């Protein structure tokens, strides 16, 4: 059932691009903005409990619907709910469309569009040098694939539609907190205190999918460079546990493309972005094959 729902959800995402604006979930911004003021300094048990509560609150309606739909009409209602929740949990934007837009803008020399799309992918101001921009965008595409797709898929397999929506809500809150933090910095305010708790909660949920995504990049790309880049980063980094999720994805992904992650990439910005997208598509096939095998074995039903 989960495999069928997942395939239908991915198909719906490809044919319903006109509905992507609905996935922005702007109606949650008010809740997040209010909640961010309650988090406090971002440290301690209280800050993390408030953050968890902010995540759980929007998940409760989906939990209630999942309980209501369970075993109704031979599981048909659960299937319908799963497909709908998956569609709204993926994204919010289509990664392939963004990469194509970036590539088209680079081909015609449209710097405004290049910088706009790069900023959307990076979630911060892009570097001005083309070689650094290409590497940064390639890394960002890998990171966004975990936040937008692979994390949703894993938590759907583990917890059904509730798990998929849970992961999406944490990422939406992370994105909103990041936006508010940048806005405060631009206004000259001190560093936003709530970011630590938000990153920790999101990091816990993204720990496993980020590593599975990195592993799939290695399997679908150049295995040895990917694993070497991963190991070398682990040997050098001072962080631990979920604090290095994004770096692991970026290093493994760029390694699988046979790019040096600590130097400017030699290929063009377009080649790096398009190459990362193709690798993600091959990695998705790896994920679907594994889920299909687990379904046959009865582990994902």
Image (cartoon, rainbow, N blue to C red):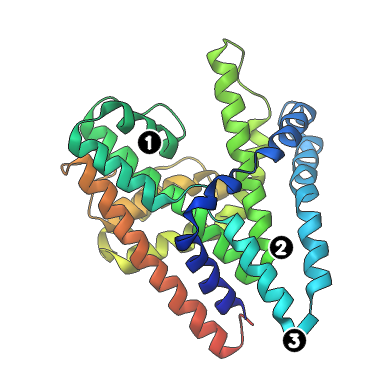
- Badge 3: residue crowd in 10 Å (few <14, some 14–19, many ≥20): few
Q: Which residue is mark 1?
A: 117
Let me know if residue 4 appears in the view: yes
Task: Residue at 31%, 26% (x, y): give it.
Answer: 112
Q: Nearer the viewer, mark 2 or mark 1?
A: 1
Q: Quadrant of the N terminus?
A: bottom right
x and y percentages locating residue 219 in the rendered image: 34, 69
- Which residue in the protein does label 3 denote? 74
Q: Which residue is mark 2?
A: 162
Quarter occupied by residue 73: bottom right
Q: Position of residue 295 (x, y in %)?
A: 56, 84
Q: Tag 1: Cα neighbours inside 10 Å, few (<14), some, or many (≥20)?
A: many
Rendered image: mark on residue 8: none
Q: Residue at x 50, y 61 (%)?
A: 13
Q: Secondary structure at mark 3?
A: helix
Residue sitting at x 22%, y 37%: 106
Quarter of the figure that contains the C terminus: bottom right
Element at badge 2?
Answer: helix
């Amino acid at each position: 059932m989960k495999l069928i729902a997942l395939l239908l959800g991915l198909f719906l995402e490809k044919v319903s691009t006109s509905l992507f604006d609905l996935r922005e979930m702007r109606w949650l911004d008010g809740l997040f903005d209010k909640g961010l003021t309650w988090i406090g300094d971002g440290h301690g048990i209280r800050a993390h409990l408030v953050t968890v509560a902010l995540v759980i609150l929007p998940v409760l309606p989906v939990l209630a619907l999942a309980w209501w739909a369970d075993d109704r009409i031979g599981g048909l209602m659960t299937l319908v709910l799963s497909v709908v929740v998956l569609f709204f949990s993926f994204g919010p934007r289509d990664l392939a469309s963004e990469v194509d837009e970036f590539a088209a803008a680079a081909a015609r020399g449209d710097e405004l569009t290049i910088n706009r799309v790069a900023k959307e992918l990076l979630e911060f101001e892009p570097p001005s040098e083309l070689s650094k921009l290409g590497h940064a965008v390639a890394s960002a595409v890998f990171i966004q694939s975990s936040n937008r797709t692979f994390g949703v898929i894993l938590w759907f397999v583990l917890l059904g539609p509730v798990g998929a929506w849970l992961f999406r809500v944490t990422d939406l809150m992370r994105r909103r907190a990041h936006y508010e933090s940048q806005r405060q910095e631009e206004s000259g305010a001190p560093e936003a205190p709530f970011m630590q708790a938000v990153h920790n909660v999101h990091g816990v949920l993204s720990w496993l999918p980020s590593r599975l995504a990195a592993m799939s990049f290695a399997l679908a790309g150049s295995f040895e460079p990917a694993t070497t880049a991963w190991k070398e980063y682990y040997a050098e980094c001072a962080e631990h546990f979920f604090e290095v999720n994004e770096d692991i994805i970026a290093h493994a992904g760029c390694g699988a493309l046979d790019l040096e992650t600590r130097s400017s990439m030699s290929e063009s910005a377009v080649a790096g972005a398009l190459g990362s997208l193709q690798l993600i598509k091959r990695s998705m096939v790896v994920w679907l094959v594994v889920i299909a095998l687990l379904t046959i074995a009865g582990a994902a039903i």
